[in-house]
């Protein structure tokens, strides 16, 4: 191994990234993006997991003391599409990391780039070079797939594996959609931005809140209460497209089962009932009744538990929220298009709306197996292990 080359690459990458740290807005509440650190060490463990993979490494400081570091990367699902696998890093391997330090824990960072001993630099969300790919397969959208338009039971065929087409996610401005639906969580001009209590300017959608909704937002601290930290899907809309995990839809005569790739969440859409039961136990998915309007599946859902509609924006929903969703297969483009309108009279003064476009996945659903390793950086002081 060429240690001098590795050290030089670490330094060069640190200098280059010093001016780009402010771009990492989503990490700001957890990591100090105004600081860039560079470390070089020996890998002790590679946790290739969701929602964030972690590299553990021993770093020898200037006094000869060996420090146990761990650095957070993207989800294993995202990394897998970029050529990573469980075999990418092995104990004893030398690696350099440039990143930002954790705000509430020592020897913990989020990485912005990796530097290999041969001098290769790979950005956090960059593709791994072919010569460093071991056992990884990309998740891609399949094209020109032969599909039956209808199932034997007469239902329009929306079954199969689906993956988000494009980045998706809630944009910052309203986008008009068919049927009057707007962008996810977008609000009219002049409505007050949600969130932004920590980590810089507001990053969430603009949405008018009721007094109760504002109180819920004020009590919400993203660094501790973000659903993903607790392996919680948060809500059914965000989870359907988040991070491009592969979803699966299975159709039966009396129900449709939606297996989310995010957090392994499962929804059942009941087709054989006309009314919701009176004894619903509130849950993230609530109770859903589906009906076909031509080739469009219309889903009516009630019985949601209190959740988080937009984790970064700090927009919460109450247990009074109801939702209507529409799913239609576009056979010309081979996409599954959906839109939703959620109404919450207790927390929201206007509907929360959005859309998604999914393509046919060339890979099947894979278990998410949430393993949260953020540790004390995302625990309230009274819950921290090291304090």
Image (cartoon, helix red, strand yellow):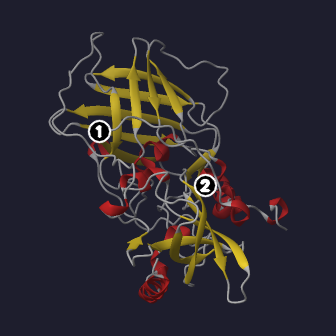
Tag 1 near tag 2, CB within 8 Å: no
Q: Which residue is mark 2?
A: 210
What residue is rendered at 66% in x and 80% in y?
60
- Nearer to me, 125 or 94: 94
SS of the residue under disc 2: loop
Q: Is residue 269 visible?
A: yes
Q: Position of residue 312 (x, y in %)?
A: 55, 61
Tag 2: Cα neighbours inside 10 Å, few (<14), some, or many (≥20)? Answer: some
Residue 225 placement, left or right of 27: right
What residue is rendered at 55% in x and 57% in y?
52
Task: Say if 172 sits above or below 350 in the image.
Answer: below
Looking at the image, tell me whether mark 1 or mark 2 is earlier in sequence order: 2
Q: Give the foreground label among 1 and 2.
A: 1
Say which mark, if any, is on residue 362. Answer: 1
What residue is rendered at 56% in x and 20% in y?
276
Q: Position of residue 162 (x, y in %)?
A: 34, 37
Tag 1: Cα neighbours inside 10 Å, few (<14), some, or many (≥20)? Answer: some
Residue 378 placement, left or right of 196: right
Q: Position of residue 288 (x, y in %)?
A: 50, 26
Task: Say if 21 sits above or below 355 in the image.
Answer: below
Task: Say if 268 sits above or below 26 in the image.
Answer: above
**Which quadrant holds residue 215?**
bottom right
Task: Say if 246 sits above or below 186 in the image.
Answer: above
Q: Is residue 348 visible?
A: no
- Nearer to me, 359 or 67: 67
């Amino acid at each position: 191994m060429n240690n001098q080359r590795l050290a030089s690459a670490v330094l060069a990458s640190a200098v280059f990234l010093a001016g780009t740290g402010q771009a990492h807005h989503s990490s700001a509440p957890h990591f100090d993006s105004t600081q860039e650190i560079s470390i070089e060490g020996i890998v002790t463990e590679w946790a290739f997991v969701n929602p964030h993979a972690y590299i553990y490494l021993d770093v020898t400081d200037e006094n000869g003391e060996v420090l146990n570091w761990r650095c957070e990367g993207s989800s294993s699902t995202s990394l897998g599409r970029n050529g990573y696998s469980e075999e990418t890093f092995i104990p004893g391997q030398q690696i350099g990391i440039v990143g930002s330090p954790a705000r509430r824990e020592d020897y913990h960072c989020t990485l912005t780039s990796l530097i290999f001993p041969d001098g290769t630099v790979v950005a956090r969300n960059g593709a791994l070079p072919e010569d460093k790919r071991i056992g990884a397969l990309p998740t891609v959208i399949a094209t020109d797939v032969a599909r039956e338009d209808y199932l034997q039971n007469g239902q329009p065929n929306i079954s199969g594996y689906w993956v988000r087409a494009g980045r998706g996610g809630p944009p910052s401005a309203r986008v008009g959609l068919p049927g009057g639906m707007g962008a996810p969580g977008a609000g009219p001009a002049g409505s007050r931005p949600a969130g932004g209590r920590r980590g810089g300017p507001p990053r969430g959608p603009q949405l008018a809140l009721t007094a109760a909704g504002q109180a819920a937002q004020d009590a919400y601290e993203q660094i501790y209460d973000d659903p993903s930290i607790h392996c919680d899907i948060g809500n059914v809309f965000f989870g359907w497209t988040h991070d491009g995990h592969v979803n699966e839809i299975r159709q039966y005569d009396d129900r449709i089962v939606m297996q989310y790739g995010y957090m392994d969440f499962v929804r059942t859409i009941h087709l054989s009932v006309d009314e919701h039961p009176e004894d619903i136990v509130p849950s993230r998915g609530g109770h859903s009744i589906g009906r076909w309007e031509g080739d469009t599946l219309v889903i009516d859902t009630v019985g949601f538990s209190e959740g988080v509609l937009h984790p970064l924006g700090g927009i919460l929903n109450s247990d009074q929220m109801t939702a209507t969703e529409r799913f239609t297969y576009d056979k010309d483009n081979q996409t599954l298009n959906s839109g939703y309108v959620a109404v919450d009279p207790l927390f929201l003064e206007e509907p929360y709306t959005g859309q998604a476009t999914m393509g046919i996945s060339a890979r099947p659903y894979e278990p998410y197996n949430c393993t949260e390793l953020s540790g004390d950086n995302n625990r309230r002081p009274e819950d921290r292990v090291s304090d």
